[in-house]
Image (cartoon, grey):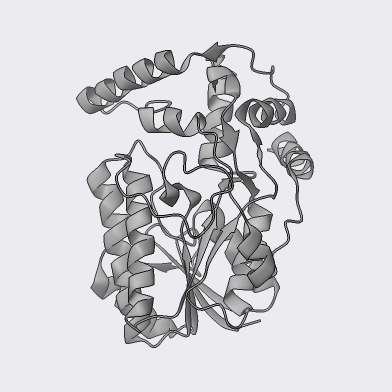
Amino acid sequence: MTTDVLVTGAAGFIGSQLMERLRAAGVNARGVDLRPSSDEMLQADICDLEQLAAVFESVRPRRVVHAAAIVDDRVDPDLVRRVNVDGTANVLDCCHRYAVDRLVHMSSIVVLGFDPGPMADETFPLCTDTGVAYFDTKAESEAMVLEAFRAGKVTPVVIRPGDVYGYGSVPWVNRVLKILRSRMPVLVAGGRGRMAHCHVENLLDALVLALDTDGIAGEIFQIHDGGEGSTYREYITRLARAAELPEPRVSFPRWVALSTALCFEGAQKLSGVSIPWTRGAIRYLCRQSTYSIQNSTDTLGYQPRIDLDEGMRILAEKLAVG
């Protein structure tokens, strides 16, 4: 395994667990985050090129995993763009300036839009006009990374995870459990929308492969637990059981959920109050698309180790001990 790695967003849900995985394997992994979670982690704002360059100057990494991003669709769109697009531009600048061997860029399946179709793969076009800041900025940042590759400035590998869950996942565990505990309806349109669930340990496997596998420069790899995923009803029902909460029974019609979300968004603009969901989230929960991981299995050697049954068993154990 490569020995000198810098991880951006190292205090986040994925970045922190990647740091643990790399260090357990003997890798000299250094982390950088706006809000470091330990004294060993470096502090820098990726939106500040001078701060980020100072980190690269200090660490001199051979390989970089860019996991820093704002994923919350309720955050100010200008801030989302500054972090996800401008921050990525700064990472690209530093990787080029300091001759980094490989950049593993964390993207997302949301770059394909709300509903790209059955078994959407890496050849499907990016969608930058969904109107959801997280979706559009992730698509733009992925395009920037690949353009820098074509220009000979960086040697990237793009990882597109599905809906990443596990203990501590904010969108797919913590937020859903909060709604379940409040007894608010959590299902939309009967929960028939599809989820490309990806256990965080499967994603970590893919990230390690992306750091070490030869001959994959410029490749894009979609990562999830395999197959066609599950419906949201199935996922949320299993999550409720894992947390020993009542299973969801009540479902909003799609139009009611969208109308409610519009009211929530208006209240947020007026008062800044935190809201449970947005119209973008509702549209995403109703999608019917599935996503191919064929390129990941054929080219990267990725094989998902943890299915939904095992993932929920692990999650239930961790929720039980808090």
Which one is in front, 153 or 200? 153
Q: Quadrant of residue 185?
A: top right
At 46% across and 55% down in the image, what residue appears? 124
Query: Residue 134 at x, y = what percent?
Result: 36, 46
Is there any visible trace of residue 44 in the rendered image? no
Q: How many marks?
A: 0
Q: Quadrant of residue 216?
A: bottom right
Left or right of 132 on screen, residue 220: right
At 20% across and 23% down in the image, what residue appears? 270
Query: Residue 63 at x, y = what percent?
Result: 50, 80
At 47% across and 44% down in the image, what residue appears? 116
Left or right of 258 on screen, residue 5: right
Query: Residue 257 at x, y = what percent?
Result: 43, 18
170 up-or-down from 304: above or below: above
Is there any visible trace of residue 26 in the rendered image? yes
Which one is in front, 127 or 153? 127
| Quadrant assignment for the N terminus | bottom right
Left or right of 228 on screen, residue 9: left
32 up-or-down from 96: above or below: above
Query: Residue 8 at x, y = what percent?
Result: 44, 66
Which one is in front, 201 or 255? 255
Name of the residue lying farthest toward the bottom: 99
